[in-house]
Image (cartoon, helix red, strand yellow):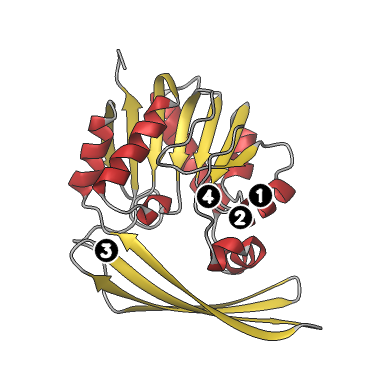
Amino acid sequence: MPATTVARPTGIYAAGDLYDAIYRGRGKDYRAEAAVVARHIRRHHPGAASLLDVGCGTGGHLRYFAQEFTRCEGIDAADGMLEVCRRENPDVPVATGDMRAFRTGRRYDAVVSLFSAVGNLGGTGELDASLASFAAHLEPGGVVVVEPWWFPANFTPDHVGASVSTVDGRTVARVSHTVREGDAASRMEVHYVVAEPGKGVRHFTDTHVMALFTREQYETAFTRAGLAVEYVTGEYPGNGLFVGVLRAGR
């Protein structure tokens, strides 16, 4: 897969091993989430055989998609995440890419973007560009599945989150505080403390500004990309899923 030149993420996104340890320790159920997504893909495209995971991260979902679909690939903007993904999924091709403008040179029966990766976009123009990129990589009748970040209407300001995970002898404590930033974004300040035998203790911080797109803005981006869209809740943790199907003639 050809790589796209993008700004290199820093902080936790540059530390794939730590990121993976945090969510493994918290019990994130990648298998169950991937099964829900695959079920929605099959509902619209029973014969789907190929999938591209955009913002694949360390490959938590991708490893299960690879068991479900004949051909799977992934892209992510963070080389630190892809390093873990390649190690854990050596048979799955992955490459560095920007969801707003990537080009793999291939088409897929399904394109997915999970774990609220689209929240990192910088406005509705970038959301439109990303959905257009997703749709441009679909085979006729193909399906796009997107896990959104929170909407302005259901975002909880002043939220504090905390977790402590110990994996392979390394302990990672994570504490976050999230507030509203302007009318259309959330701002999450995160502190990490990492303790390892033989290495001692270190601390670093991250700031994540995430777009608070409305449901209508997501649906408009899907429609502009030529996708018939539905919003589904109740089966997937978090804020549900948008499922789009490429309309005939696109």
Q: Look at 59% across and 69% down and name the residue there.
A: 22
Upstream in the sequence, badge 2 or badge 3?
2
Res. 202 visible in picture = yes
Residue denoted by label 4: 77
Residue type at tag 3: Ala
Sequence order check, earlier mark of 4 and 3: 4
Q: Is residue 123 left or right of residue 204?
A: left
Query: Which residue bears the numbered disc 1?
Result: 85
- In terms of depth relative to the viewer, which is nearer, 45 or 218? 218
Q: Locate the N terminus and report the quarter of the image it occupies.
A: top right
Q: CA distance from mark 1 to mark 4?
A: 12 Å
User: Label 4 to label 2, Cα distance in Å?
Assistant: 8 Å
Tell me the mark number nearer the camera, choosing from 4 and 2. 4
Circle 1 — which element?
Answer: helix
The residue drawn where x is 47% and y is 44% is: 98
Quadrant of residue 156 within the rendered picture: bottom left
Q: What's the residue type where badge 4 is placed?
A: Ala
Q: Residue 201: x, y in percent?
A: 68, 86
Q: Which residue is mark 2?
A: 81
Closest to the camera, between mark 1 and mark 4, is 4
Ranked by sequence position, the earlier of labels 1 and 4 is 4
Q: Amino acid at mark 1?
A: Cys
- Residue, disc 3: 185
- Compared with 211, 216 (above or below) is above
Mark 3, other Cα within 10 Å: few <14 / some 14–19 / many ≥20: many
- Relative to 238, residue 50 above or below: above
Front: mark 1 or 3: 3
Secondary element type, mark 3 = strand
Q: Earlier in the sequence, mark 1 or mark 3?
A: 1
Q: Position of residue 75 (x, y in %)?
A: 55, 42
